Amino acid sequence: MAATLKDIAQRLNLSAATVSMILNNKSVRIPKETEELVRRTARELNYHPNRMAVSLVTKRTMNVALIVPDIQNTFFAELAKYVGDYLKTKQYNLILCSTNYDVQDDIRLLRMLRAQMVDGIIGVFTGEDPEYTREIERVLADKIGIVMMDKVVSGVTTPYVGTDNFYGGRLAGRHLVENGHRRIAVITGPLGSVSGQQRLAGCRAALEEAGVTLDASMIYEGDYQYDTGYEAGKKIAQREDVTAVFACNDMMAYGVYKAAQEAGRPIGKELSLVGFDDLRFSSMLEIPLTSVRQPVREIAARAVDILLGNLAGGAGEPADGVGGLTPPSLVVRESVVRLA
């Protein structure tokens, strides 16, 4: 049978209230030696608090859910790591959910998390659906906090954090034109997503500033997966007029690497390439990838701080405010050739 607070208190001839305050890191006037003895005894008796009972008293479960569209994507895996690590420093637990870019999965998970008693949700939602708005309103009505990442759900005012994707796309496009490229192909993210739209728009803006037109034949819609980068890369590598590619995330850029190599147009020699995310593997490639770096650690910490601040009664940031965006930076490596 599991040890209880009463068992520890009886062994040490202390009140259960005193033991509870010590183990819950509450301020209590008691000698340091006694506090250490309580903690040591709790370990010896293999004491673990009854989280359900604690939550009934505190009205907190100490659980936060993170909803991401694709846990196989290294960017979201890194995001989950940083969110989980930072939550741990705040004595919160992470519940990780992946939706495989399925809008109905997002809605299903929101319903499930309402029933599972989480304190808050950090959501990278994947599309637009009227049911999103209704379900998020139900979550908020249940006093569960929400912070959105990457996109805003229409009709709902909740805090938002993310990367300035338009600025990131502009950085990529500008770097390519500054290196003499004029025939630039773009492999987008899903054009139904805000990030996909904004990265393309930013790149287009940079090209137009340089007097370069991005026509429709140079745009290939992807889905942030390696396979779509590979398939689009095979088509692009056959086009002799294309000298450079902006892949709107690094996973698709890796697919372009393979396709270009197979076609005899190796990256960094015959074909230039810029990615987006700056994943860990991008610096390890034979020709290291130039990529737009998302400050994922900073974004993760900011999302957690805003969420927990709101749970504690603080003020959140507007859902559509520019203050929610963190500017990315360009990491220049060896995948872009300068044309004469």
Image (cartoon, helix red, strand yellow):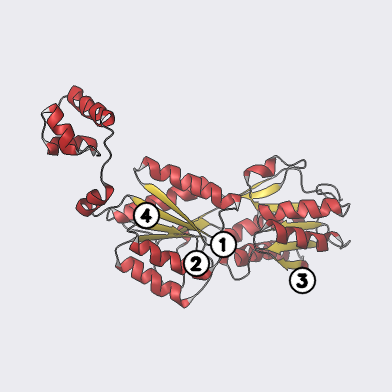
In the image, residue 247 sits, relative to residue 128, either above or below, namely above
Q: Position of residue 208 (x, y in %)?
A: 72, 66
Determine the CA span between mark 4 and mark 2: 22 Å
Determine the CA span between mark 2 and mark 3: 35 Å
**Quarter-wise, where is residue 133 in the image?**
bottom left
**Residue position for label 4:** 307
At label 2, the amino acid type is Asp
Q: Assess whether mark 4 and mark 1 are in contact (beta carbons under 8 angstroms).
A: no
217 with respect to 126 (left or right): right
* Eye-nearest disc, 1 or 4: 1
Give residue 215's mark.
3
Mark sitting earlier along the chain (1/4): 1
**Quarter-wise, where is residue 66 in the image?**
bottom left
Identity of the residue drawn at 75% across and 72% down = 216
Identity of the residue drawn at 81% across and 60% down = 234
Q: Answer few, some or many: residues within 10 Å of disc 4's Cα (few below 14, many 20 plus, some between 14 and 19).
A: many
